[in-house]
Image (spheres, rainbow, N blue to C red):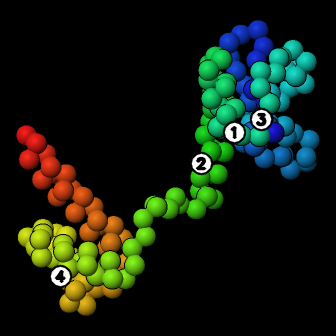
Amino acid sequence: MYEVRYGRSNVMHISGLPEATKASADGMRYAASACPAVSGLAFFATTTVALTTDDLAAAIAAARSRGRLCASCTKAADRAVAAKRATEPPAESGVRLDGDQIKALIALVATKHADTDAGTLAKRLLAGELTVTDQHVRKLVDALTEACVAQYMKETA
């Protein structure tokens, strides 16, 4: 749960971000929040809650729309967003090609774009020198897309 808070200035803080410091060996010193301003009890008594949400992106957007986001909160929020992105699976494209479509794609690039790097890659795939991977298919699709855009630009110029 994230709370966007502000006091008498236009500096916004986000409470609920993961702490940035570790506890001391004796356990007496620790950070309640990543931001020193949010760690103090007086902060909660003298501030106003602008937004309470479970969505970190919404909290960041709300804080930035209402004023300047504190530098410590900005760094902690960036770390939290990066950590979340690192654990999320990569976005899938909506297009799936079956085996026959991939073979047709390789043959098309090998014949129509033989003088390019993609054409050379396609020829090697056809000859069995390389195993077809998703990365190879993406390169071939990108090459065809680039060629189609170039052709369209030439025809409309």
Q: In this view, does 70 lie above or below 76?
A: above
Q: How far apart are marks 3 and 2 (CA)?
A: 19 Å
Label 4 secondary element: helix
Label 2 secondary element: helix
Total numbered labels: 4
> Which residue corresponds to mark 4?
123
Q: Which residue is drawn at 91% across and 48% down?
A: 26
Q: How far apart are marks 3 and 4 (CA)?
A: 54 Å
Q: Distance between the residues labelled 1 and 2?
A: 12 Å
Q: Which of marks 1 and 2 is nearer the N terminus?
A: 1
Q: Residue at x 62, y 23 (%)?
A: 64
Q: Which of marks 2 and 4 is nearer the N terminus?
A: 2
Residue 119 coordinates in the image, percent (x, y) = 16, 73
> Which residue corresponds to mark 1?
56
For the question of whether residue 36 can be seen, the reply is: no
Residue 53's tag is 3
From the viewer's side, name the closer residue of 141 and 128.
141
Residue 143 coordinates in the image, percent (x, y) = 22, 63
Please identify, in this view, whether the residue under mark 3 or under mark 2 is nearer the observer: 3
Q: Do the residues labelled 2 and 4 touch (CB within 8 Å)?
A: no
Going by the numbered disc 1, the residue's amino acid type is Leu
Q: Distance between the residues labelled 1 and 4?
A: 48 Å
Q: Do the residues labelled 1 and 2 touch (CB within 8 Å)?
A: no
Q: In which quarter of the image is residue 145?
A: bottom left
Label 3 secondary element: strand
Q: Earlier in the sequence, mark 3 or mark 4?
A: 3
> Which residue corresponds to mark 2?
82
Mark 2 surroundings: few (<14), some (14-19) or many (≥20) residues within 10 A: few
Q: In which quarter of the image is residue 77?
A: top right
Q: Residue at x 10, y 42 (%)?
A: 156
